[in-house]
Image: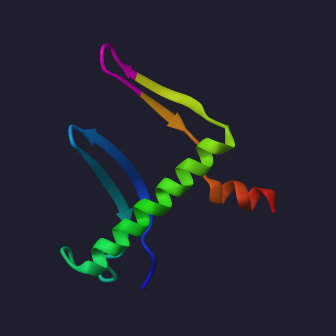
Amino acid sequence: MSAPQLQRLLLDFRSGELIARVLYRRSLEDGPNPGTNKRRREVEELARSGLRDALEALNAGDVAICGTSGFTTREDILSLPRPDHARKAAS
């Protein structure tokens, strides 16, 4: 079974709750069924690893705004180097 690959992690802060949208790629034959504890744990770990990578990249300080939108509600898109790619380049 191949490990899933995180494609996108979106955090949506709503009144009273936090919604994490975890988009990942995996073969249809490989993954656990929706609604199972195994699937929930797999997605939780993808979210954790994505958040750890994002925090590591933010702490590294190499952040660039690569897109903006909005008037009264603003949306800025940050571009961060992936920590796993930076570690490979350094070695």
List x then y, in percent, for residue 45.
42, 68
Screen quadrant of the C terminus: bottom right
Residue located 36% across and 66% down the image: 44
Q: Which portion, as a residue range, is magenta? A: 69-75
* Left or right side of 3 for 62: right
Residue located 52% across and 29% down the image: 66
List x then y, in percent, for residue 76.
44, 27
- Vertical placement of residue 40 versus 64, above or below: below
Which picture quadrant has residue 33? bottom left
Which picture quadrant has residue 1? bottom left
- Vertical placement of residue 47 versus 80, above or below: below
Outermost right residue: 91
| Residue 81 seen in the current view | no
- Vertical placement of residue 87 versus 13, above or below: below
| Residue 11 seen in the current view | yes
Q: Is residue 50 magenta?
A: no
Front-most of residues 17 and 65: 17
List x then y, in percent, for residue 53.
55, 55
* Left or right side of 89 for 40: left
What's the coloring here? rainbow
Which picture quadrant has residue 70? top left
Residue located 70% across and 54% down the image: 86
